[in-house]
Amino acid sequence: MQVPAGDLLQKINSPSDLKQLSEDQLEEVCQELRQYIIDVVSVNGGHFAASLGVVELTVALHYVLNTPYDQLVWDVGHQAYGHKILTGRRDNFHTNRVYKGISGFPKRAESIFDTFGVGHSSTSISAALGMAVASVYKGEKDRQHVAVIGDGAMTAGMAFEALNHAGIANSNLLVILNDNCMSIDPNVGALKEYLTDITISKPYNSFRSDLGYVLSKLSAIGPDALKYAKKIEKSIKGTLLKQSNLFEALKFRYFGPTDGHDVKHLVKVLRDLRDIPGPKLLHCVTVKGKGYALAEKDQTKWHAPGLFDKITGEIKKTHHEKPQPPKYQDVFGHTIIELAEQNPKIMGITPAMPSGSSLNLMMKAMPNRAFDVGIAEQHAVTFSAGLASQGLVPFCNIYSSFMQRAYDQVIHDVAIQKLNVVLCLDRAGFAGADGPTHHGAYDLAYMRCIPNLVVSAPMNEEELRNLMYTAQLEDAGPFVIRYPRGNGVMVDWQRPFKAIPVGKGRKITDGEEIAIVSIGTIGNEVTKALNELNTEGYYPAHYDLRFVKPLDEAMLHEVFTKYPKVITIEDGCLEGGAGSAILEFMADHKYNAEVMRLGIPDAVIEHGEQPELWAECGYDAAGIIRQVKAMEVKPNHHIIAS
Ligand SMILES: Cc1ncc(C[n+]2csc(CCOP(=O)(O)OP(=O)(O)O)c2C)c(N)n1
Ligand SMILES: CC(=O)[C@@H](O)[C@H](O)COP(=O)(O)O
Ligand SMILES: [Mg+2]
């Protein structure tokens, strides 16, 4: 739904329009920009609190910098709505994250102002440094390069790798640390405490104010005394900063902490910084959700609240007459507590997604056994491996696409050593509105090729529980369980645990002429398709593979012996995925069937609701029906009639 923008904002079609305004008008621009974000996100959905927190910074940056020549890189990009609105996408903003609409993150193909595609966190400093070094190489002395990174994103190893390089790279790089003390959940770790310390100004700021007092006294004595005091200040400050400031120790010039909501002051500071060469870090203190009281109060809830009434703040929920199936993440969250109550070896680990994974339930119930380790997927996996090496059974829950960060850790630290780490991959398959950076498209393929791993995918909530139960049994070894974003299919899901034999699939229904082999929850689209196909006289068999490693060879022998036509379905990439595994099996055993594989093609699939994307790739129920018919399966009207 399109909503009108304020009078000033309506006239800004690019940063050059913004630059025509006086500094005195900037506060009004900020107010209108903030209101526009509230107006549009409340009716269209999307990330919310982070963009509100950087309104002033966004306006100041586009006012001072010569974008897009000067290069501005947003970290994660969930906070870049103001940037999008000021850079020509105001009138399209209501299509944000909608199928075929604009992306929820900066994206190079969408705008020249989006210098770098993002979605995953902690890439901005490396990317901006690459741009800055390229400018040095090309002799572009006047070009500015700015990375805006949050305090949450700064907890990642990659951000530190980039700082380590940038400190000696002698290029023109400004890192703006947007410190709001929040990740999606409250930020965690020693770095967060350090940032709080320098913000509430422990040793350095008290030194500064003491020195200010001494200076004011000396200035009363005379100009020479003042000059001398300033000299001392410079030398003490240099030494003290190097010793006490982490960023100065890494050879950055540190500025701040500064008020990230004072737009005029930000303009002044950014202008000053433009003229200082080398790596610099500006520490901005902001409030996540700034300007929307409820969001300021409950920043986690308002990170991405869904649709809401902007006046009352009521978050809109679809009303259902009957109880609804739970979200898979909640099945995980409740089940791990149940299991941990029975098995004292179980621990829970999340890299910065306590609410998203529902591990927050365990963190509350068993605080000494569940850890948020920050945005640090690599560390999360190896930390889990360390726990497992001591006989514990860690459940390390990572979104499928974020697990891509920790691939070497899975191989080197978990699989080779055969450690009993349970890797729960949430948001597997299409993630939906977050789009290609967040789709969990590749996990079946990238996990399947690693020795020693068990790789599984439940078709429903009960299966998820039973796989979690199986994975924590004695000597289960490294065990992957992948499941999607969203709700399950069972209302009565909390059934007693049953162990599942590792590598054993299940036959859901026998059939005629054709078999459909699915893996994971996409199998429920097969169920829907079969209901319709049966009414037309088609009777495909349906098998749930459950494990892509090890494969249920006995079940596959049955499939290829009984059915000349086979369709495989997965909510994952076709290249190297479950269908590929079945083709390999067929070739190895010299079966000769007609096999069609359905799944995500070798292409970047954009954002949209999950069913829209399944339909686009041809593996929603309608696509499955089309595929069965396309394989010229003969309907059996005799059975319909009986
Ligand atoms: C590699 C990776 N892990 C996790 C996430 C999920 N995630 C998105 S935003 C966010 C919090 C970022 O915090 P911060 O950088 O401080 O930004 P803020 O939301 O506070 O503005 C997290 C954990 C991600 N996008 N990428
Ligand atoms: C920006 C980001 O990476 C997260 O905010 C992500 O959008 C969360 O996804 P879920 O909504 O699926 O938890
Ligand atoms: Mg933050």
Image: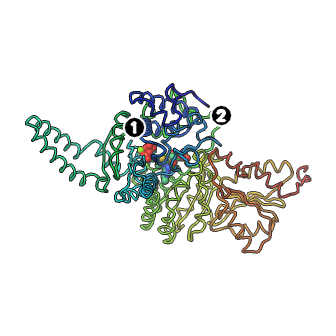
Residue 468 position in % (x across, y down) = 56, 58
Mark 1 or 2, which is nearer the eye? 1
Q: How busy is the neighbourhood of tag 2: few (under 14 within 10 Å), some, or many (20 plus)? A: few
In front: 292, or 111?
A: 111
Residue 528 as seen in the image, left or right of residue 307: right
* Lower sequence index among marks 1 and 2: 1
Residue 630 as seen in the image, left or right of residue 322: right
Residue 559 position in % (x across, y down) = 77, 66
Q: Residue at x 50, y 43 (%)?
A: 78
Q: Is residue 447 above or below residue 185?
A: below
Residue 284 position in % (x across, y down) = 36, 42
Residue 640 as seen in the image, left or right of residue 153: right
In front: 585, or 110?
A: 110
Disc 2 on helix, strand or loop? loop
Q: Can residue 506 be seen here?
A: yes
Q: Residue at x 49, y 29 (%)?
A: 35
Residue at which label 2 appears: 321
Q: How busy is the neighbourhood of tag 1: few (under 14 within 10 Å), some, or many (20 plus)? A: many
Residue 147 position in % (x across, y down) = 42, 48
Q: Name the quadrant of the N terminus.
A: top right
Q: Can residue 359 be seen here?
A: no
Residue at which label 1 appears: 287
Q: Is residue 252 above or below residue 480?
A: above
Query: Which mark is drawn over residue 404?
Result: none
- For the residue marked with disc 2, what is the amino acid? Glu
- For the residue marked with disc 1, what is the amino acid? Val
**Going by the picture, which residue comes out furthest to the left?**
221
Asked if the residue at tag 2 contacts the one at tag 1, i.e. Cβ–Cβ closer than 8 Å, the answer is: no
Disc 1 on helix, strand or loop? loop
- Of the four image quadrants, the one with ligand 3 is top left
When asked about the image quadrant of residue 295, the answer is top left
